[in-house]
Image (cartoon, helix red, strand yellow):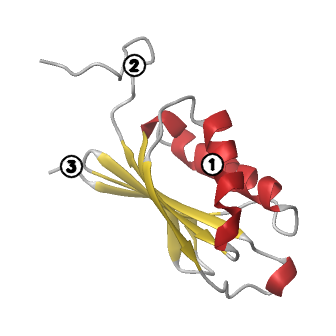
Amino acid sequence: MSEIVRLDINEEWAHSGIIKAGDFCFLNYCVGNIGGTIEEQINGAFDEMEKRLALVGLGLENVVQMDCLFRDIWNIPVMEKVIKERFNGKYPVRKSIQTEFAHKGGENGLQFQADAVAYCIPVLSAKSSDSPTD
């Protein structure tokens, strides 16, 4: 078995931003642009996700699963718009959850957070993922 690699460590919060374990990477607490509009925060979260994935040579196309946390679940259509713009048709499975964030900004602070699992083998962009393999 390969080693477990922990990166983007936050000692204050006692967590790793990304962990590579075997063929998968696990990302948590991807947030950004806190205090901005919901669309700005969703883009900020995906910017943070891209930054962490880049630490292990991956991109958004490697994300296979996401948990998307919202202060207001009715903002799902905004997230779907951003996913269509950012993931280039390589959509992960996902679930959306409404929650009250324990964040100092309260209602005007954190509106969106994404956690994700990525497949750690680089995806070949030239190969179509739409056709099954034999």
Q: Which residue is mark 1?
A: 80
* Residue at the image point whose x is 35% and y is 40% from the top: 120
Disc 1 residue crowd, few under 14, some 14–19, many 20+, Cα 10 Å? few
Which dot marks residue 104? none
Residue 71 placement, left or right of 29: right
Residue 29 drawn at (x, y percent): 58, 67
Answer whether labels 3 and 2 touch (C-beta < 8 Å).
no
Disc 2 residue crowd, few under 14, some 14–19, many 20+, Cα 10 Å? few
Location of residue 95 with respect to 77 vertically, above or below: below
- The CA distance from mark 3 to mark 1 is 35 Å
State the SS at label 1: helix
Q: Quadrant of residue 31?
A: bottom right
Image depth: mark 1 or mark 2 in front = 1
Q: Which residue is mark 3?
A: 2
Q: Which residue is mark 2?
A: 124
Q: Amino acid at mark 1?
A: Glu
Count of numbered labels shown in the rendering: 3
Q: Earlier in the sequence, mark 3 or mark 1?
A: 3
* Residue at the image point whose x is 57% and y is 35% from the top: 87
- The CA distance from mark 3 to mark 2 is 23 Å
Q: Quadrant of residue 42?
A: bottom right
Q: Earlier in the sequence, mark 1 or mark 2?
A: 1
Image depth: mark 3 or mark 1 in front = 1
- The CA distance from mark 1 to mark 2 is 24 Å
Residue 24 placement, left or right of 133: right
Image depth: mark 3 or mark 2 in front = 2
Residue 75 drawn at (x, y percent): 70, 63
Q: Earlier in the sequence, mark 3 or mark 2?
A: 3
Residue 42 placement, left or right of 126: right
Residue 58 visible in the displayed image: no
Question: Toward the viewer: 81 or 60?
Answer: 81
Residue 95 drawn at (x, y percent): 46, 63
